[in-house]
Image (spheres, rainbow, N blue to C red):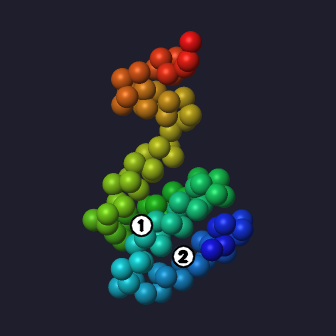
Amino acid sequence: MNISIGKFDDSIDLFGKVQRYPNSNKAGSALFMQGFVAENHKQDVEQAKVFYQKFLEKYPEHVLANDCRMLLQQLSLSPEALIEMFEKQNGMTVSDSLPM
């Protein structure tokens, strides 16, 4: 697919074409993937947020909905706040995980 050759905008467009068929069992996943590509390959946080929010509006019960909520929450955090959140979740600090 276009992702593997670095054509991220083309990939987002192709996933968008699936949206023409809203009753397709792939429509929700395709919309989620638009956000994923924007976030992880284009490094475009704002575009990712738009896709993720649209996904949650259209598919709030989708199998990926909880993951999407978590991603949206994380996108709004600073790197420091993100580290702090992970430390609290795992009961450790960054220095605890470094080799001695």
Q: Is residue 47 left or right of residue 90?
A: right
Callout 2, which amino acid? Phe
Quadrant of the rendered structure where residue 28 is? bottom left
Q: Nearer the viewer, mark 2 or mark 1?
A: 2
Q: Which is more N-terminal, label 1 or label 2? A: 2
Quadrant of the rendered structure where residue 57 is? bottom left
Residue ID at (47%, 17%): 96
Residue ID at (72%, 68%): 5
Q: Is residue 96 left or right of residue 88?
A: right
> Front-most of 12 and 92?
92
Q: Position of residue 44 (x, y in %)?
A: 63, 55
* Outermost residue to the left: 61
Mark 2, residue position: 15
Image quadrant where one finds the C terminus: top right
Callout 1, which amino acid? Phe
Mark sitting on residue 100? none
Q: Position of residue 6 (x, y in %)?
A: 72, 65
Mark 1, residue position: 55
Quick check: can you spot residue 24? yes
> Front-most of 2 and 77?
2
Q: Is residue 20 above or below residue 34?
A: below
Q: Is residue 28 left or right of residue 18?
A: left
Residue ID at (56%, 18%): 99
* Outermost residue to the front: 100
For marks 2 and 1, give the CA distance.
13 Å
